[in-house]
Image: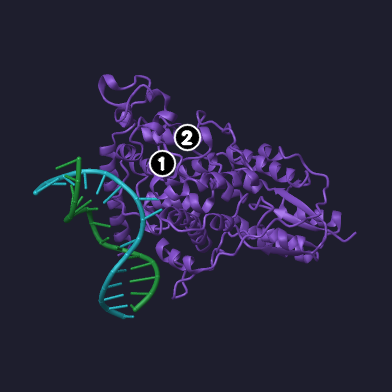
Chain colours: A purple, B cyan, C green
DNA sequence: TTTTGAGTTGTTCGA
DNA sequence: GTCGAACAACTCAAA
């Protein structure tokens, strides 16, 4: 029998349109499908993320007649041992361009090279590999629109079908090792009231992704209008699939090609994902550091009261209905509508004066679709610390946003049952309305939005002044 | 080098 | 209720 090759699955958990897998299969040898449980990645992950991954891997393995091999340990060591075990001399994987993955992949390739094993990285989770697009001066773009203008001119490769593969199966750890390994390193702000039970899983795996594509065909042409309303089923809900690679954006661009504002706006959201990956590629420190250094001077609350406010935010007990509905949607479903992500993030930074990193960490802890580049840069955008930062006086009013985007209170009452007896627009108001109309069991507002808006403006102005003085 | 036009997603105030 | 201006002034990218 010809010596097998190893295919190392990471965030490309699909068989169709997986160029790295196609390249491995093209050798015409048996393929060992491998997933490595890496504690570096799993220990700081919440159970939401881990259970989603575990279920997706189960689905992937089922699609290979149960052949998936799961091993736990350092990638270099696992790959070396497995290669020795089966007599493989080459390993294939999809390229990873995010911080840890990039360092790991370089190290793994070097380590394998010393023992005569060839490591092949093919393609990336993106249509355009991060680091590819440059401005005319050769620098990476720092604003989205300029990036998109170039991105739009590049050709998107056509998707390819799943290859025919002869899977070679071996002894494997049970998939439960994934959720068993997760959640060991908790965020510093974690309090006893914050739950770490995973939300119920949506349908996972490659087939489930394609069902979402089919269903979205009937809605995408209205996407430009409906995408902002969290109470309307206007979005594709494909984000977890893009995160774990059960579908590739190439496949989506092909599936949704066509004229119209709905499609155009939806593809531009895919382009945002590509842009943020590009920013991360060039500025890996942006994961936890402000892209605008002058914002390091912003006064942030970190005392006991701040922790209590953070807890109220995370549990959906701020007394601001749209904020609370969004945070409870995250708790209960492992996903949050994008409009509400912006509103809740803005509230944390601008009304509670907390650190965007706390919020970003909590989102990553609970989201099924938590993607380092998109999550951290989305937070930086809202916090006013990003490269293309919003002007700091642009502060979302949680009540106005509710009135604009959830006018009938469908979303708010879905996730905040205390408000169910209260009609819109009262149910959109802080505390669920005034006086006798306010539901007695709903949280009183933790802060006064108007007061804290002014405080935020003061702090941002102060940060700029201090930064200016420090420069001069 | 200098200039010019543009920059996801908003809110408030006053006419 | 509606509309435009102000918010505060900076950075980016190309010409």
Residue shown at the point (62%, 58%) measured from the top left? A96
Q: Residue at x 70, y 55 (%)?
A: A162
Residue on which the image places disc 2: A329
Tell which subunit mark 2 falls on. Answer: A
Q: Residue A350 or A260: which is nearer the viewer?
A: A260
A467 shown above or below A67: below
Q: Cβ–Cβ below 8 Å for labels 2 and 1?
A: yes
Who's the residue at 60% across and 37% down the image?
A47
Q: Where is residue A181 in the image (x, y as percent from the top left)?
A: 67, 40
Please tell me which of labels 2 and 1 falls first in the chain. Answer: 2
Would you say A345 lies left or right of A126 here?
Answer: left
Query: In the visual, does A247 lie left or right of A453?
Result: right
Label 1 belongs to which residue? A340
Residue A91 at what x, y percent from top left?
75, 60
> Dividing the picture into quarters, in which one does residue B13 lie?
top left
Query: Dot 1 lies on which element?
Result: helix
Image coords of residue A143 (percent x, y): 41, 62
Labelled disc at residue A156: none
Residue A111 visible in the snapshot? no
């Amino acid at each position: 029998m010809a010596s097998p090759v190893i295919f190392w699955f990471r965030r490309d958990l699909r068989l169709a349109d997986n160029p790295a897998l196609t390249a491995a299969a093209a050798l015409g040898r048996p393929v060992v499908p491998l997933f490595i449980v890496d504690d570096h990645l799993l220990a700081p992950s919440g159970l939401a993320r881990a259970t989603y991954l575990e279920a997706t891997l189960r689905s992937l393995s089922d699609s290979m007649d149960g052949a998936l091999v799961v091993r736990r340990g350092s990638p270099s060591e696992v790959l070396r041992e497995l290669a020795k075990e089966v007599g493989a001399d080459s390993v294939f994987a999809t390229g990873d361009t995010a911080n840890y993955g990039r360092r790991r992949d370089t190290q793994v390739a070097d380590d394998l090279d010393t023992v005569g094993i060839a490591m092949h990285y093919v393609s990336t989770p993106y249509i355009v590999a991060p680091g590819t697009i440059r401005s005319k001066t050769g620098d990476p773009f720092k604003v989205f629109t300029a990036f998109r203008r170039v991105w739009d001119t590049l050709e998107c490769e056509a998707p390819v079908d799943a290859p025919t593969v002869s899977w070679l199966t071996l002894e494997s750890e049970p998939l439960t090792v994934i959720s068993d390994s997760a959640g060991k390193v908790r965020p510093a702000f974690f309090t006893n009231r914050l739950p770490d039970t995973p939300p119920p899983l949506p349908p996972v795996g490659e087939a489930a992704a394609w069902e979402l594509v089919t269903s979205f065909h009937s809605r995408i042409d209205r996407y430009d209008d409906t995408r902002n309303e969290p109470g309307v089923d206007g979005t594709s809900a494909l984000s977890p699939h893009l995160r774990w690679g059960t579908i590739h954006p190439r496949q989506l661009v092909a599936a949704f090609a066509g004229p119209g504002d709905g499609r155009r706006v939806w593809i531009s959201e895919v382009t945002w994902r590509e842009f943020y990956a590009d920013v991360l590629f060039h500025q890996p420190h942006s994961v936890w550091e402000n892209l605008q250094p002058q914002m390091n001077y912003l006064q942030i609350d970190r005392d006991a009261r701040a922790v209590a406010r953070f807890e109220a935010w995370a549990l959906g007990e701020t007394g601001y209905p749209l904020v609370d509905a969004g945070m409870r949607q995250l708790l209960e479903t492992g996903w949050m509508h994008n409009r509400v992500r912006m509103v809740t993030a803005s509230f944390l930074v601008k009304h509670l004066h907390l650190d965007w990193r706390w919020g970003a960490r909590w989102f990553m802890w609970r989201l099924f679709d938590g993607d380092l580049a998109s999550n951290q840069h989305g937070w930086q955008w809202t916090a006013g610390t990003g490269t293309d930062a919003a002007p700091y006086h642009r502060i979302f009013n949680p009540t106005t946003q509710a009135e604009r985007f959830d006018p009938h209170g469908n979303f708010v009452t879905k996730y905040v049952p205390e408000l169910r007896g209260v009609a819109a627009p009262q149910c959109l108001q802080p505390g669920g309305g005034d006086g006798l109309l306010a539901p007695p069991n709903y949280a009183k507002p933790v802060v006064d939005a108007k007061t804290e808006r002014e405080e935020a403006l003061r702090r941002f102005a102060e940060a700029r002044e201090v930064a200016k003085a420090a420069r001069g």
